[in-house]
């Protein structure tokens, strides 16, 4: 038996080691590019981006021969290559400052990802495709250029389509016609998200009422049917979260509809009515199933939210301003303590009282000083020991951490000290849990590990005044999470493995934004460590007798994968060729502009530009997203202004110096695809304050490229 266990541990060590080594090498390459990016010219940037993508795809094919006993490596590298394709498309949009809208970026990225998922049935491709398509749809509905003003019916139609498609996909997966557990979670969550979006609006608007009734019926059916069929308990949790949001939003919509603070005199009775009905209904549940626990949770959260807001509203109406500590004392004495001391009361009543007490007390004590916060921390400790629900113990522990951090922060204690205090407290709990009650040990273990590592992770971004201490903390964190990973593998501790692996990946990813540690130094460090880990793991791997009987999909479907990769290269080539053609042959045009300053999801800092031709006075409004050709004429100052326009495929009419093509976005707004101007990080404010004009290139077909902005 020991030999089997040893081989399993070694196998997990090898798999995780390979992933860690390759992840660090990947991070090192990206960080190296980022460190030298400003010094690269356009063609170097394009070449490096394409080369990186080809490197991952090529290595994926290479590993089918060199490491064919490890098929997951070639599959993982193929997936990484697809991720790199998306980054390459984003970089091209950044370089040319043309049609870099996030909708087009994510749609172009989603097409090959969807093809990969169809032909490989690889779960990460399923997830990536689903996410990219929905993100693309989101940015189509709400463009990053901030030009959107479609009819409300248009948005609702799209959300209905999203809801129908996702619930259909969910049922298809549950029928077994498509195998993807992760996709079933995503599709169910997307269904609820779309339906919740449809139910937002005025409370008694006929469409809102109709959709709300349909949603309640559909959600109730899915809730009932999933429990009857014994589907995953997490489906029930997702439905419970959606129900909680729906009910809380409807309460807020009700308050807005009434429009009078006096309504709190009525809503204070709502929790009693809801809980009373729930107590009766809860008896229908014969066993303590997940459905029963979720039902209790939804009722408790919604009732607590209504009760807390109504109570605070009534007090403010009667008394006016009141010291926050008085709210805390009342909630503790009349809600929290009785709920804990009366375990014989119905669980719905007790948990509603506890949550109501938390909603009132925690905000009240956060800024009242250290000693008041620490006193309430003792109350939370008492609740943690006495309450029987494990979920509520986790909630109480989280509340305790919030209050503990606030207790130090309100006294202006340095973030470094607060982080160390949180780490110290959780380590004391972690190593002292064996002396407490046995039924608390696993809960204390879970919470203390999570919050100590989280505080440690935050600590790695601090200590800016002392580089030596900063270096020590970062090295210590990285070594700690790496050691914990392999300890988890050796002890087969799933929870510790997940937490430490997430902490490890977060460190590698988020250190990109840590300016104290230069990108070049990160690149060199990660490359050295990554190569070392990969070499050690490969050395161990060669001395094992393991040989996978499963072939990589890369080896099985080499031909079709090459076709998809070729499509990606063609897409990149077409994008570069079209842009270069406009640069070479397009007419130079100067436009007056007004900038804004956000940040792109993938492409770094940029400025959103509004031109004087971005908003037009039109006698007849085109359809949303319809093509519109705008004729420009040059004024005496050399700036081009609006002169005329044609819609759709109408022939250009009227005298104009240049015709530029855009898309109508409602309310007179036209989007030309040149609204995003990418800049060096941290220079957005300067551009926003000083830029007055933009120089663009316009091709014969009306496509435009943004060249520069200037004063």
Image (cartoon, rainbow, N blue to C red):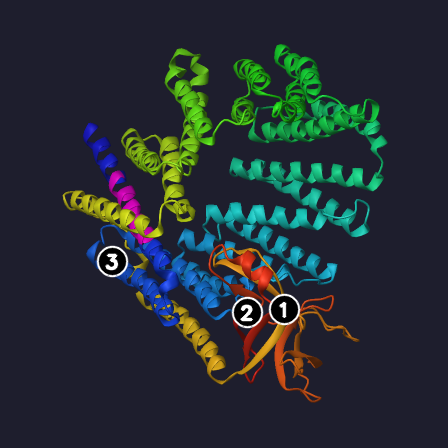
Question: Which residue occupies the foreground of this view, 619 or 420?
Answer: 420
Circle 2 Cα neighbour tier, 10 Å, few/some/many (<14 / 14–19 / ≥20): many
Q: In terms of sequence position, does the residue under pointer 1 or pointer 2 come before the other? A: 1
In primary-sequence order, the first of circles 3 and 2 is 3
Q: Which residue is mark 3?
A: 64
Give the mark, 3 or 1, whose residue is nearer the N terminus: 3
Q: Nearer the viewer, residue 204 or 506?
A: 506
How many angstroms separate mark 3 from mark 1 (CA)? 53 Å
* Residue 582 disc label: none
Q: Quadrant of residue 638?
A: bottom right
| Residue where numbered disc 2 is placed | 709
**Residue at image x 35%, y 49%?**
518
- Whether residue 50 sits left or right of residue 399 in the image: it is left
Give above or below for 213 relative to 333. Answer: below
- Percent x, y for residue 559? 32, 68
Cβ atoms under marks 1 and 2 closer than 8 Å: yes
Q: CA distance from mark 1 to mark 2?
A: 9 Å
Q: Nearer the viewer, mark 3 or mark 2?
A: 2
Q: In terms of secondary structure, where does tag 2 sit?
A: strand
The nearer-to-camera label among 3 and 1 is 1
Q: Is residue 268 magenta?
A: no
Q: Is residue 22 magenta?
A: yes
């Amino acid at each position: 038996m020991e030999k089997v266990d040893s081989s399993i541990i070694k196998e997990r060590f090898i798999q995780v080691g390979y992933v860690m080594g390759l992840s660090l090498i990947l991070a090192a390459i990206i960080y190296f590019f980022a460190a030298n990016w400003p010094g690269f010219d356009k063609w170097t940037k394009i070449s490096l981006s394409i080369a990186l993508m080809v490197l991952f795809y090529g290595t994926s094919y290479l590993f089918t021969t060199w490491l064919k006993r490890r098929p997951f490596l070639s599959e993982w590298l193929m997936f990484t290559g697809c991720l790199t394709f998306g980054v390459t498309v984003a970089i091209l949009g950044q370089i040319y400052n043309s049609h870099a809208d996030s909708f087009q970026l994510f749609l172009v990225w989603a097409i090959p990802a969807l093809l990969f998922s169809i032909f490989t049935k690889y779960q990460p491709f399923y997830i990536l495709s689903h996410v990219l398509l929905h993100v693309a749809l989101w940015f189509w509905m709400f463009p990053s250029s901030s030009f959107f003003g479609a009819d409300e019916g248009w948005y609702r139609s799209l959300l209905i389509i999203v809801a129908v498609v996702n619930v259909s996909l969910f049922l298809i997966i549950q029928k077994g016609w498509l195998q993807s557990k992760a996709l079933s979670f995503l599709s169910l969550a997307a269904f609820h998200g779309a339906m919740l979006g449809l139910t937002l609006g005025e409370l008694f608007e006929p469409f809102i009422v109709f959709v709300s009734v349909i949603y309640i019926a559909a959600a109730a059916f899915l809730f009932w049917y999933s429990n009857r069929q014994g589907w995953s308990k997490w489906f029930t949790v997702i439905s419970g979260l959606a129900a909680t949001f729906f009910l809380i939003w409807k309460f807020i919509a009700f308050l807005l509809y009434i429009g009078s603070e006096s309504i709190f005199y009525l809503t204070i009775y709502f929790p009693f009515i809801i809980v009373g009905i729930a107590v009766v209904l809860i008896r229908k549940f014969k066993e303590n199933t997940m459905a029963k626990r979720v039902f209790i949770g939804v009722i408790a959260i919604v009732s607590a939210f209504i009760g807390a807001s109504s109570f605070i509203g009534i007090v403010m109406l009667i008394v006016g301003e009141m010291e926050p500590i008085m709210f805390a004392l009342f909630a503790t004495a009349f809600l929290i303590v009785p709920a804990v001391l009366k375990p014989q009361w119905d669980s719905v009543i007790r948990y509603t009282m506890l949550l109501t007490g938390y909603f009132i007390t925690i905000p009240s004590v956060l800024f009242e000083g250290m000693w008041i916060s620490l006193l309430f921390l003792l109350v939370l400790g008492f609740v943690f020991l006495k309450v029987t629900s494990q979920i509520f113990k986790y909630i109480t522990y989280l509340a305790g951490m919030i209050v503990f951090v606030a207790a130090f922060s309100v006294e202006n204690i340095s973030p470094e000290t607060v982080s160390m205090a949180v780490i110290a407290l959780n380590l004391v709990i972690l190593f002292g849990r064996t002396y407490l009650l046995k039924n608390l040990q696993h809960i204390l273990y879970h919470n203390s590990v999570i919050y100590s590592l989280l505080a440690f992770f935050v600590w790695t971004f601090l200590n800016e005044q002392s580089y030596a201490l900063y270096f020590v903390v970062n090295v210590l964190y990285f070594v700690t999470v790496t050691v914990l990973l392999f300890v988890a593998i050796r002890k087969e501790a799933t929870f510790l493995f997940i937490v430490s692996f997430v902490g490890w990946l977060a460190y590698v990813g988020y250190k990109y934004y840590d300016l104290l540690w230069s990108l070049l130094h990160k690149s060199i460090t990660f490359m050295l460590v990554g190569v070392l880990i990969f070499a050690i793991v490969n050395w161990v791997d060669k001395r094992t007798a393991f040989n996978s009987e499963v072939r990589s999909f890369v080896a099985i479907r080499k031909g079709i994968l090459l076709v998809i990769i070729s499509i990606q290269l063609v897409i990149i080539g077409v994008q570069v060729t079209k842009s270069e053609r406009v640069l070479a042959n397009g007419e130079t045009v100067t436009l007056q502009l007004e900038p804004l300053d956000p940040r792109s999801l993938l492409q770094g800092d940029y400025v959103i530009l509004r031109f004087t031709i971005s908003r037009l006075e039109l006698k007849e409004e085109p359809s949303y997203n319809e093509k519109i050709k705008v004729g420009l004429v040059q004024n005496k100052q050399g700036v081009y202004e609006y002169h005329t326009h044609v819609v759709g495929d109408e022939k250009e009419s009227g005298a104009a110096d240049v015709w530029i093509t855009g898309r109508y976005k409602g309310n007179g707004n036209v989007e030309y695809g040149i609204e995003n101007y990418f800049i060096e990080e941290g220079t957005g404010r300067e551009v926003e304050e000083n830029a007055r004009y933009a120089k663009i290139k316009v091709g014969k077909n009306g496509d435009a490229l943004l060249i520069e902005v200037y004063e």
